[in-house]
Amino acid sequence: MRAPLDTVVQIETPEHIVFEHRLAGPARRALAHVLDLVLCYGVLLLVGIAILFGVVGGAALSGELSSLAKASVGLVLLLVFIVQWVYFAAWEALTGRTPGKRALGLAVVTTTGRPIGVREATLRNLLRAADVLPVGYVVGLACQLCTQRFQRLGDLVAGTMVVVPERARGGSPIVLRPPATAAELASLPQTVRLDPEERAAIELFLRRRGQLGAARERELAELIAPVIADRVGAAGMDPVRLLALVFDLAARAGRDEGPVSSRGGS
Amino acid sequence: MTAAAAGRGADAPGAARIAVRNRPLLDVFDLAVRFVAVHAAAYARIAAVVLLPGAAFTYLLGDGVSWWIGWPFAVLMAAVAHTPFTLYASRVVFEEGVTVKSVLAASLRSLPGLALARFMQFACIAIGLAFFVVPAAWIGATLLYLGEAFSLERGGAMHAFSRTQRLAGAAFGDAMLGAGLLVTLHAAATLLGDVAGRSALDGLFATTPPEPVWSRGGSLLATVGFWCFVPYAATVKFLLYLNVRTRSEGWDVQTRFAALARRADDDRGGRA
């Protein structure tokens, strides 16, 4: 069966470690681009106004356009050039993201998941001129529709993609409330092992408790509780409580297997 | 479509054709791009039946009578034309062997009730507009999931109105931003259709492009741009609906638990 449709791409390192990256598609990238354009042309507008009032205005009062005023117009043209050709490449070469991408939490990386360098940043931004054709990034959009990693022409040539790097989350530990009673502990084995998928699914469920409603929580827990109950030999227990207890026991077992410094207090 | 119905889909929710999880708003817009690209062939067949007549009527009305009548007609018709795309997307996510024909037949059956619901929706938004933009935007966001609630939950127009309010209320920020983005993108697609189309006609085919949209308030190319956006808009709205239900009803948990339960069944079957 084909993998479910998603905006995630998996990258395997030479050491066969698989990383998942969440891709940024046309919507996020377009919004980031608009933010960059607003920033660039906003600054440009301010500079232009300052020049208009400060230099050209003064020259008009004195009745002649000084060489300083002409140089200022040249400066504006230079800024336009910088905005179009240097701004994106320079930011991405230096930090891997432009301010617009930073605002939306995006970053440009290579298709192997590494940070991009000057070569990649320059290439992908030079090809922007082709992506923008005939107008409004139609070529770039069509290209993103056809590629697995939402790559425009510039990305394909430079071997890059735009991702949403996962922020390191210090997820708060899930606390069993109320704590396990002696009777509950007696009805369960001392250690319970859950495979990574089970652990992730039950953790997701426990983190969502309180947002779903008691009836829905029970309905969901009943999908998996019989399987777990069979394995640990705990029949007749409330399914939601069973999942919470089993997860807690498995988490404790995991901590006890780790170094002493990582173990819980009691 | 209820959570239980999703769970009992032909292939069970663990086999949903998209990864069901609580997504940020813009991720939904991105996923919709991928969804449309993957199902482009089926969408094209639906579009040939639904969108071509809509575009033709819009152009004939706008060009022949007035674009002041053509565009409101297009907006109302496009809202109704969302239905087959919504139904196709919802079925293809949870079921095998979905045919365009069955989707079109189901859409046709729901047409009278849906047209009435859509008319009421636009009447509400028009009344909101009479009090300036903010009330209209609020009403538009509140009624964002009307089509999905009507088509997928099959409870009638009044049920759909109460459901869309509850669904939008569960994540009102997303509904408001989503509705705003969709309207903005639809307007942008309409303009882009005109500008890019004229540019292509002029540059690539060396023919004289038609008058731009701003000279008469509408054009054939703008009409094409407007109607081409409909499948994407319908997909975004369906995925937003799926997202809000995932958030409020734990469909992401359900798909994972169902997959684990099925795996356990398979293991037992293998051992037996």
Image (cartoon, coloured by chain):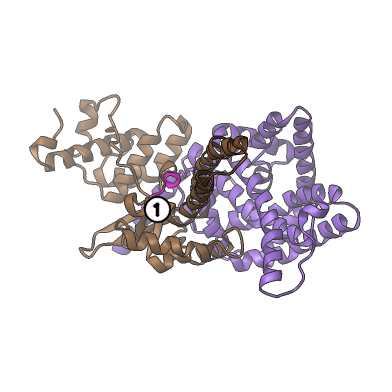
Q: Quadrant for the C terminus of chain B, please.
A: bottom left
Circle 1 chain: A
Number of numbered callouts drawn:
1
The location of residue A181, given as percent across then percent down, is: 23, 25
Task: In the displayed orientation, state which residue is furthest to the front.
Answer: A63
The shade of chain B is purple
| Range shown magenta | A97-101
Residue A196 shows in this picture: yes
Image quadrant in which you'd find residue B132: top right
Say whether residue A9 is left or right of residue B226: left
The shade of chain A is brown
Say whether residue A10 is left or right of residue B73: left
Task: In the displayed orientation, state which residue is furthest to the left.
Answer: A260
Q: What amino acid is found at the position of numbered circle 1 in the picture?
A: Val
Of B267 and A140, which appears nearest the observer? A140
Image quadrant in which you'd find residue A132: bottom right
Q: Residue at x 81, y 54 (%)?
A: B215
Of A47 and B165, which appears nearest the observer? A47
Q: Residues within 10 Å of mark 1 (few under 14, many from 20)?
A: many
Mark 1 falls on what kind of element?
strand
Of A49 and B204, which appears nearest the observer? A49
Of A47 and B238, which appears nearest the observer? A47
Image quadrant in which you'd find residue B268: bottom left
Residue B101 shows in this picture: no
The location of residue B242, given as percent across then percent down, is: 54, 46
Q: Main SS type for the magenta part?
A: helix
B151 is higher (above) or lower (below) than B88: above
Q: Residue at x 57, y 35 (%)?
A: A58
Q: Which residue is mark 1?
A: A163
Say whether residue B70 is left or right of residue A198: right
Residue A186 belongs to magenta span: no
